[in-house]
Image (tube, coloured by chain):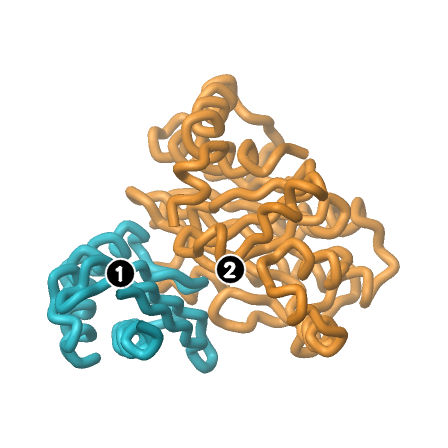
Amino acid sequence: MHGECKIKVPGGKMVSVKVDYNKKILSVSILGDFFLHPEGTVYKIEESLKGMDAASGKNEFADRIANVLKVQNASLIGADANVISSAIEKAIKDGMASN
Amino acid sequence: MNSAARNMAIDHAIMNSVRAGRSSPTIRFYRWKPSAVSIGCFQSMNDEVNVERCGAAGVAYVRRLTGGGAVYHDINGEITYSIIGKEELFPKNIIDSYKLICNWIIESLSRLGIKAEFAPINDIVVAGKKISGNAQTRREGILLQHGTVLYKVDVGEMFSLLNVAKEKISDKMIKSAEERVTSVSAHSDASIEELYAALLSGFTEGKNFSYGSLSEEEKDEAETLEREIYSTYEWNFSR
C-alpha cells in the first residue's frame, strides 16, 4: 500500500511524507522545504523507519526519528520529529483508506 | 550569468576550494541564464516543478545543495548571491548565522531607501512581504549560504512553472501570492544594476576584500560538477 501526507508547520516549513508499506514499512520519503544539517541525515532517518510495524503509533515513529537526529547531532529547522511522525501516521491511514 | 547547473556547480566548486585552502572566503553575485527554477535538496522535482512547462518555456531546473523551497530565478527578476567560508567565521547557531548574512542584504536595501527586516527562519521582508529567500548548508567545515533578492516579480509566470494544478492557479491565489511577495521595483526606481551596486557595497562594507574571478581549478571543478552532478537526471530527480 501507498500513502501520502503533507503538513504545513505553523510558522515553519512544509513536510511531505510518502510511505510504502504492507504490515511493515517498506520505504519512507521525507520531503519538503525544511532544513536539516547535515543533510544526509534524512537518508538515515528514512532507513531507520524501514521495517517498523505500519501500525506503530506516531510516538514510536517520533522516538525513532529523534534518536537518529541525536546520534547524528543533527539540526532540523522548520520542522521536528513530531511533525514528521504525525505525517507518517496520517500517510499510512491515508493509504488504508484509499486501498 | 550562467546556466542553473553551472551556477550550482560553481558554488560547490568554491566550497571545495575554500575547504582545501586554495581560495579565500568568497562572496559571489550571479544571475541565471536561461531563467530557472531551483528546488531545495529535500524536495521532489516532479512534485514541485512543472517540468513540461519549463521545457516548453526554455526554463531550466536544478536541485540545490541546500534545503528550503522552490525558487523561480527570472533572468531579469532577481539577483542571487552566495557566501562561502569556513564555519568558524560565522555564528554556530544557524538562525544567528542567517541573521548575520541577511543583515548585509537589509543594509544593501537600505541604500536604496527600502526598509527591510529579517523574518526567521530564512526570509527578509518589507512591510511583511517577502523580498529575499535564503538557504544554507554546512559541509565538512564550510558554510555556504545562497539566496535571492527579488528585483521584480511576475507571480503568474512563477505559478505556471511550479507544479500547482492549473485549476488551482486562480486569480485569488495569484492575488494572495502578490500580497505575500514584493520586490525592489515595487519600492524603488533603482535599476537592477543599481541593486547590484547596493548589494556589493552592503556585503563588503567593513571587510578586507579584493575583486576576483574563478580560479582555473575552480572553473575545471565546476565543469566536472556540472557534468557529473547538477546536469544529471539522477541528481535533479533523486527525490
> Who is closer to the viewer here, B105 or B16?
B16
Numbered disc in front, either 2 or 1: 1
**Residue identifier under label 1:** A28
A80 is higher (above) or lower (below) than B65:
below
Residue depicted at 69% across the width and 39% down the height:
B58
Could you tell whether A73 is left or right of B113 in the image? left
Instruction: Give the residue at the far front of this rendering.
Output: A99
Secondary structure under tag 1 reads strand
Task: Residue B143 in the image: state x and y as whole percent.
Answer: 40, 47
Could you classify mark 1 by the number of other residues whose Cα lies within 10 Å: few (under 14), some (14-19), or many (20 or more)?
many
Colour used to depict chain A in the structure image: cyan
Residue depicted at 62% across the width and 34% down the height:
B3
Q: Quadrant of the C terminus of chain A?
A: bottom left
Q: CA distance from mark 2 to mark 1?
A: 20 Å
Please report, as a chain letter, where disc 1 is located.
Answer: A
Kindly tell me whether residue B116 is visible in this rendering. Answer: no
